[in-house]
Amino acid sequence: MSNILIYILFVFMIFMSIQNFKILKNAKKGKGYIEAASAVFKEEVDAKEKLEKFVNDEKSDAMYLSKASLIETWFELKEKGTCDSLNKYDTSLLFKTNNKLDDKQIDINADSFIWSILDMARSKNIGKEEYIDKFVESYSSVDFADRMEYQLVLHFAKFLKGDEDTSFFKTISQASEEGLKYDKRLVGIYRRIASLCLDIKGEELDDYSKEDLKTFAQSAVGKLLMCELNVFEKYDVVEEVEEKEEENKEE
């Protein structure tokens, strides 16, 4: 084997080693973020500590710090009634590649939109409705017009502020949207959020959607959102079962 070929193979091996290292490193970061977010969803007592550890471990990674800032805001709203952590949220880091909007990156980080919705609901719940527009404005540096996630954030903000127009939620709930891109992994959550807003507004839902909201209430996202909107008891199947059991005992 010639020296040139050996050199080429050696360079290739080094390149592949570097690529594999990057993949493993990113996988570790992704796992850390998921564990921190899951701790919040599961309402673990040390959820905040896990988030702080993740932020401290990844303090040199601007993208993950931006992603985690919405969860930091979740705690800040409850503990301090402020949302200063939102200033660290940079959509360009999460949703752009080479300064261009990247649908693949949007899909990867689509959960950020859900965290924005949860944070807005909490803002409303603690009497800080003036913060709602700040979450919408945090997306203003990127053109998300054709993304369902952004449109959901936009219309959810209007819903919280008393807007009576429910046409967008009907479109999403009935899966009749056209021209909107969305992350297929999370679209079920988007549709349930839309149905929830419709039901709260007094719009008539079909039987499937009504039952689906009870299922949503048993999920991590659904329970957190419904609790912040102060409607969880309406959809809590466990509570319904307990009430029926009590009624049967009385009979």
Image (cartoon, rainbow, N blue to C red):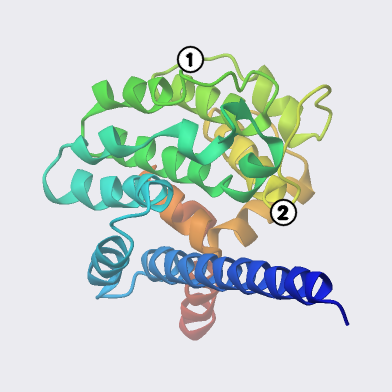
Which mark is drawn over residue 248?
none
**Location of residue 5 by image quarter:** bottom right
Percent position (x, y) of residue 158? Answer: 46, 19
- Distance (Cα) linking label 2 and label 1: 28 Å
Number of marks in the rendered image: 2
Residue 147 x/y as whole percent: 67, 28
The residue at the far bottom in this view is 249
Q: Quadrant of residue 6?
A: bottom right
- For image coordinates 28% across by 57% down, the residue present is 59
**Which residue occupies 24% across, 41% down?**
85
Secondary structure at badge 1 equals loop
Q: Is residue 230 above or below residue 38?
A: above
Q: Is residue 200 left or right of residue 58?
A: right
The amino acid type of the residue labelled 2 equals Arg
- Say which quadrant the N terminus sits in: bottom right
Characterize the local packing of mark 1: few (<14), some (14-19) or many (20 or more) Cα atoms within 10 angstroms.
Answer: few
Q: Secondary structure at mark 2?
A: loop
Q: Residue at x 38, y 67 (%)?
A: 36
Q: Residues within 10 Å of mark 2 (few under 14, many from 20)?
A: few
Residue matched to label 1? 163
- Residue 92 position, x and y percent, is 48, 31
Foreground: 246 or 141? 141
Which residue sits at x=48%, y=66%?
A: 34
Q: Nearer the viewer, residue 173 or 138?
A: 138
Name the side, left or right, on which 195 lies relative to 51. right
Q: For the residue marked with disc 1, what is the amino acid?
A: Asp
In the image, 194 versus 177, the foreground residue is 177
**Chain-order first, disc 2 or disc 1:** 1
- In the rendering, which numbered label is found on residue 185? 2
Residue 194 vs 20, above or below: the answer is above
- Farthest front residue? 3
